Image (tube, helix red, strand yellow):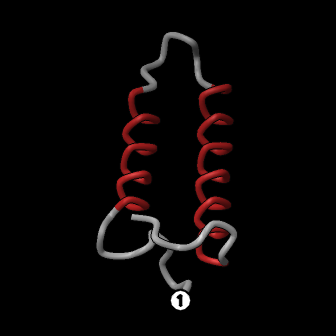
């Protein structure tokens, strides 16, 4: 679980990483054909949210 206080360096880094991931995925979706399968995007987002919510840490590697 993200245990950092709102606005803490760890929370800010986690939010920035998630924002960058979503932006990148949106870019890829925009450029793929409308009929293409987009389930892979949900898989990636779910995995990232699972990492953020993991009880073993705050979801930010290398940010102590």
The picture quadrant where one finds residue 59 is bottom left
- Would you place residue 48 above or below residue 56 in this image? above
In screen coordinates, is 26 left or right of 46?
Answer: right
Return the residue at label 1: 64
Q: Looking at the picture, how far across and down is residue 43, in whole percent?
A: 37, 39
Mark 1 closeness class: few <14, some 14–19, many ≥20 residues within 10 Å: few
Q: Residue at x 63, y 66 (%)?
A: 6
Task: Please give the name of the residue rendered at 59% of the width and 50% of the height, measured from the top-left corner.
Answer: 21
- Relative vertical location of residue 50 with respect to residue 33 in this rendering, above or below: below
Q: Quadrant of the N terminus?
A: bottom left
Count of numbered badges drawn on the protein: 1
Q: Quadrant of residue 57?
A: bottom left
Q: Position of residue 9 (x, y in %)?
A: 66, 78
- State the residue at coordinates (68%, 36%): 27
Helix, strand or loop for disc 1 = loop
Between 49 and 11, the one lying in front of the other is 11
- The residue that appears at 38% across and 59% down in the rendered structure is 53
Q: Please give left or right for residue 31 compared with residue 37 in the image.
A: right
Furthest-bottom residue in view? 64
- Residue 15, placed above or below residue 64: above
User: Horizontally, is 21 left or right of 36 in the view?
Assistant: right
List x then y, in percent, for residue 42. 42, 34
């Amino acid at each position: 679980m993200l245990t950092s206080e709102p606005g803490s360096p760890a929370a800010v880094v986690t939010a920035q990483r998630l924002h960058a991931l979503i932006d990148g995925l949106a870019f890829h979706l925009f450029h793929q054909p409308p009929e293409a399968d987009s389930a892979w995007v949900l898989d990636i987002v779910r995995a990232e949210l699972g990492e953020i919510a993991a009880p073993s840490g705050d979801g930010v590697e290398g940010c102590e």
